[in-house]
Image (tube, rainbow, N blue to C red):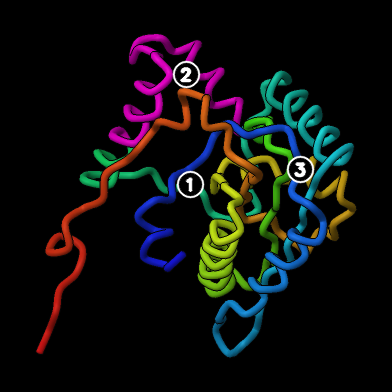
Amino acid sequence: MSIESILKNRYSVRAFQAKPVPEAVLKQIFSSAQLSPSNCNVQPWQSCVVSGATKDKLKAKFIETLMSGATPNPDFNWLPQYQGVHRDRQFGSANALYSSVGIAREDKKARQMAMVRNWQFFDAPHAVFFTMDKYLDIMGAVDLGIYAQTLSLVMAEHGVSNCMQGALGQFPDPVRDILGLPQERGILFGMSFGYADDTAPVNNTRTEREALDTAVAFYE
């Protein structure tokens, strides 16, 4: 499968089959992702893959944290609010998602419950947290983004689906505690992954992309 074909067919999966990805396939995928480029070959990513009992323990702790009314305390700057056309695109994405599962715009409770699904990993058998030393800041974040996209493409080549999730970086303390990460290590974001449940309505969600002339300028 070509990269172009993968990009044209890929979508964010929010419902998964229960069966796990075989360990050998997991290691092959993450080994290939190690070839991802990074600034000065720093390779700042330190990926934490959770499955089984560890994933379930994290899920329970996330829900406990949410139920306590805790506010997000991300390790990195997730504070800026989208404006203008970026805000419009955010609304468009949310509308596509909620429409696919029949949640009305005014049904705030249902929307909140749909949001909580992020911290339940959408019932995926696996999740990965993308972490790096906090001092790396924006330079490290750029490299982690490149790495995560590389990982996503390699997963698709192996028939494994995923959903990138900024939400998994919103409450870093449970992750740090359960995985035993040092304080100087920050959790930037995460990804739930596994085999897609093609029967789930939520997986019918599709979003649009801007036209080339809106996103790219060619100079000669």
Say if 1 sits above or below 195 in the image: below
Q: Secondary structure at mark 2?
A: helix
- Judging by the rendered image, the residue that carries numbered circle 1 is 79
Question: Between marks 3 and 2, how big is the CA–CA gap?
Answer: 28 Å
Circle 2 packing at 10 Å, graded few (<14), some (14-19), many (20+), is some
Circle 1 packing at 10 Å, graded few (<14), some (14-19), many (20+), is few
Say if 19 sits above or below 41 in the image: above
Instruction: Pinpoint residue 10: horizontal percent, then vertical percent.
Output: 43, 50
What amino acid type should be assigned to the residue bearing mark 2?
Arg
How many numbered marks does the figure carry?
3
Magenta residues, start to end: 91-118
Specify the label residue 111 is tagged with.
Answer: 2
What amino acid type should be assigned to the residue bearing mark 1?
Leu
Instruction: Pinpoint residue 144: horizontal percent, then vertical percent.
Output: 58, 67
Question: Between marks 3 and 1, how big is the CA–CA gap?
Answer: 34 Å
Specify the label residue 20 is tagged with.
Answer: 3
Instruction: Pinpoint residue 95: horizontal percent, then vertical percent.
Output: 32, 27
- Among the 4 quarters of the image, the one containing residue 93: top left
For marks 1 and 2, the one nearer the N-term is 1
Say if 98 sits above or below 186 in the image: above
In the image, what residue occupies the spot 60% across and 27% down? Answer: 117
| Front position in the image: 27 or 129 | 27
Instruction: Pinpoint residue 183: horizontal percent, then vertical percent.
Output: 81, 58
| Front position in the image: 159 or 52 | 159
Q: Nearer the viewer, mark 3 or mark 2?
A: 3
Instruction: Look at the image and tell me in which quarter the C terminus lies.
Output: bottom left
| Front position in the image: 24 or 172 | 24
In the image, what residue occupies the spot 67% across and 76% down? Answer: 34
